[in-house]
Image (spheres, helix red, strand yellow):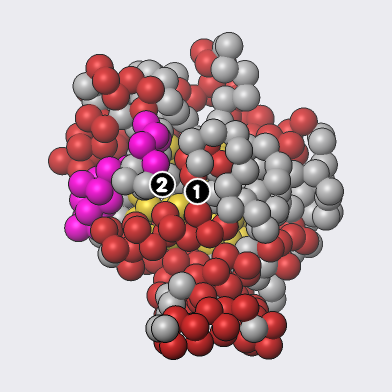
């Protein structure tokens, strides 16, 4: 009999040990920076389905639940909700941006233009909100639109969604081996000049390597998982994960069931932890963060993290796996902060 395994199993199932670990998980959240690199919550705000400042039984995230989890900053995505009319991209983006600035007066909310806003949000217990343009189709082929979006507060750009746009091919077109267009290369260069984070989530593999070739600053895959664990077109190969790490970038692990289980079947937080640990092993522990994708897929979130307020249960799972408190602090926010400091200032 392997006595070490017996004692390990007993400690895992010991209610007292579970309580100690949970207290440690909550302590880690309260003592460290927590950043979620991708949420789709603004769409519900635009539709008037719920109010960001009030706790709701709908969706995955809102201000009270972000505070419950100790989240200091959330990156909110601007994406075409009317995909039948992508030519109206600028107009749709302005709807989101207007909604974003409409949240600024909400008590406890701080718009993020640079990392000093995140730092200043921590002490009074505010939540920083940062804007990301979630599909480059919304530029409508205009570099001037990119500059104007920056002036309106956008600090991150996801180059494509799964389909093709004027910047390049999305993940659904990876078989075509199409990468960035000449306009796409111009966008990556201009984003670096502006101080806007380039996000390769949803981009084709050829496009990924194009970005790597020309990137002048660390870039991210804000919400993506590991192809080695699930062969999904949206997930990153080990070669891509390694390249992101070597470039000083970051992969934000997604909670989206489709990228964890490959189906609409609910994922578990244990499966999400598998992706986090694999990404740490390949990209490096300083190059992995969170990009939950909450409010971009159906409820609930991965069991038992049904919404953002239960995020400490992920930390509990990582502690059970032997991930150290310092490593978890990196995953929760320190690694995101490093990239944001390098790019947006």
Tell me which numbered mark, 1 or 2, is placed earlier along the sequence: 2
Indicate the secondary structure of the residue bearing disc 1: loop
- In the displayed structure, does residue 199 sit left or right of residue 248? right
What is the span of residues highlighted in magenta in the rendered image? 230-247
Q: Residue at x 42, y 83 (%)?
A: 1
Indicate the secondary structure of the residue bearing disc 2: loop
| Image coordinates for residue 38, horizontal then vertical, percent | 53, 48
Above or below, 11 relative to 53: below
| Image coordinates for residue 146, horizontal then vertical, percent | 42, 33
| Image coordinates for residue 320, horizontal then vertical, percent | 51, 75
Residue 331 visible (yes or no):
yes
Residue 218 visible (yes or no):
no
Is 46 or 153 nearer to us in this picture?
46
- In the displayed structure, does residue 245 sit left or right of residue 78? left
Q: Quadrant of the C terminus?
A: bottom left
Q: Residue at x 70, y 46 (%)?
A: 300
Q: Residue at x 84, y 48 (%)?
A: 57
Q: Is residue 242 magenta?
A: yes
Q: Are marks 1 and 2 in contact (CB under 8 Å)?
A: yes
Q: Is residue 118 magenta?
A: no
Q: What mark, if any, has residue 31 been given in the picture?
A: none
Q: Residues within 10 Å of mark 1 (few under 14, many from 20)?
A: many
| Image coordinates for residue 287, horizontal then vertical, percent | 33, 61
Using the numbered discs, state the Cα–Cα distance from disc 1 to disc 2 in whole angstroms: 6 Å
Q: Write down the residue under mark 1.
A: 254
Is 336 or 280 nearer to us in this picture?
280
Is 189 or 174 nearer to us in this picture?
174
Is 210 or 138 nearer to us in this picture?
210
Above or below, 83 relative to 29: above
Q: Write down the residue under mark 2.
A: 225
């Amino acid at each position: 009999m392997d006595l070490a395994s017996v004692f390990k199993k007993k400690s895992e199932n010991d209610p007292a040990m579970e309580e100690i670990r949970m207290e440690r998980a909550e302590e880690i959240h309260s003592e460290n920076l927590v950043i979620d690199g991708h949420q789709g919550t603004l769409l519900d705000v635009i539709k008037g389905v719920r109010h960001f400042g009030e706790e709701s039984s709908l969706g995955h995230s809102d201000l009270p639940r972000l505070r419950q989890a100790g989240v200091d900053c959330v990156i909110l995505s601007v994406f075409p909700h009317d995909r039948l009319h992508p030519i109206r991209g600028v107009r749709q983006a302005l709807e989101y941006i207007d909604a974003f600035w409409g949240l600024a007066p909400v008590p406890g909310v701080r718009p993020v233009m640079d990392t000093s806003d995140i730092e200043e949000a921590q002490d009074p217990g505010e939540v920083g909100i940062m804007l990301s343009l979630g599909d480059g189709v919304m530029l409508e082929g205009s570099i001037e639109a990119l500059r104007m979006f920056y002036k309106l507060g956008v600090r991150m750009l996801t180059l494509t969604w799964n389909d093709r746009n004027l910047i390049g091919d999305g993940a659904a077109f990876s078989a075509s081996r199409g990468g960035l267009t000449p306009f796409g290369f111009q966008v990556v260069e201009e984003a670096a000049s502006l101080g806007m984070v380039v996000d390769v989530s949803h981009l084709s593999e050829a496009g990924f390597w194009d970005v790597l070739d020309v990137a002048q600053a660390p870039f991210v895959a804000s919400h993506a998982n590991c192809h080695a664990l699930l062969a999904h077109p949206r997930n990153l190969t080990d070669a891509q994960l390694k390249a992101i790490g070597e470039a000083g970038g970051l992969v934000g692990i997604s909670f989206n069931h489709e990228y964890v289980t490959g189906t609409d079947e609910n994922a578990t937080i244990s499966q999400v932890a598998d992706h986090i640990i694999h990404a740490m092993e390949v990209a490096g522990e300083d190059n992995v963060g969170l990009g939950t994708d909450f409010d971009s897929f159906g409820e609930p979130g991965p069991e038992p993290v049904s919404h953002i307020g239960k995020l400490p249960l992920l930390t509990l799972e990582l502690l059970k796996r032997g991930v150290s408190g310092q490593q978890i602090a990196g995953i929760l926010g320190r690694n995101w902060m490093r990239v944001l400091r390098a790019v947006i200032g």
